[in-house]
Amino acid sequence: MGTLINNITNYYTYLNENLADPRTNTFPLVSSPIPIIVIMYVYHRFVKSWGPAFMANRQPYDLKKLIIVYNLVQIYLSLYITLECVNKLYITGYYSLWCQKMIYEDTPLERVVVGKVWLYYMIKIIDLMDTVFFVLRKKFSQVSFLHVYHHLGMCLLGFVGTKYVPGGHGVMLGFINSIVHAVMYSYYLISIVRPQWVRQWWKKYITQLQILQFLLLILHFGHVLFEPSCEYPKWVSFVFLPHNIFILFLFSDFYIKEYILKKNKRI
């Protein structure tokens, strides 16, 4: 029994300490997987069980002002991450668009990269509030498997990326996703502040943009596996690709049901 416990302890230390990037391993919500696991568990239980039970005999909460502030914060953070990537990494040629290896040198710019990777991870945790707002407003139909799985998956991948590979090729994920989120939260903001401006086709094209996002990320991470000269760790693709492929399938299925099959039924 003692040997088993020692083996488990040694393996945990190996995964949590030895393999981790020392630049981020002391950051909040990175040094141990336990906090993010707890956050994900509480989130799932709240949106699927505790929240609906709490709201069963209550009127929907009026969260309009809070959601406006939340959307503005999300737009700002998404644009900030996007512009940082463009101005400091891609326009300057410091990072390659097609294949970027990890840079472990402790330089001022790499400290910026590491800090922004951690910030992106924090944004994925903040994103969980989307579902909490749905529950408190009693919009339970919005709390779909696609919605919850996507948020949980991004939190987990955010943890993995920040702890083990904070930079390099994976930065493109945060860059593309931040562009999509800037558009998406702008739509959410307009829909709550000026609903009369919203057009039905906007939502359809945002879904198409999300699908395009996952296609690009599958291509971006997939080619690492077949490009011998690419020095980015290939194990990252084996972790990230299944999530992106599955989420692409879920979004495509939603798009077909919502915008193709329903349209055909109306015709």
Image (cartoon, rainbow, N blue to C red):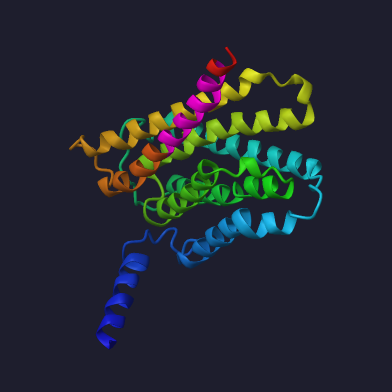
Locate the C terminus by quadrant.
top right
Q: Residue at x 56, y 22 (%)?
A: 262
Q: Is residue 129 left or right of residue 104?
A: right
Check the image and name the residue furthest to the left.
Answer: 228
Magenta-colored span: 247-263
Residue 24 magenta-highlighted: no
Residue extending furthest toward the top: 267
Residue 203, placed above or below residue 112: above
Q: Is residue 133 left or right of residue 241?
A: right
**Residue found at x 27% / y 49%:** 235
**Is 259 contained in the magenta span?**
yes
Magenta segment, principal secondary structure? Answer: helix
Q: Position of residue 44 (x, y in %)?
A: 56, 56
Can see residue 153? yes
Compared with residue 245, is residue 115 higher up or lower down, i.e. above or below? below
Viewer-side residue, 126 vs 147:
147
Q: Going by the image, does 182 lie left or right of 145?
A: right
Can residue 27 be seen in this snapshot? no
Q: Which one is nearer the viewer's eye here, 210 or 24? A: 210
Give how far across and how far down residue 10 sits, in percent.
Answer: 29, 75
Which image quarter: residue 232?
top left
Residue 227 in the image: above or below residue 108: above
Q: Is residue 105 left or right of residue 145?
A: left
How many discs appear? 0
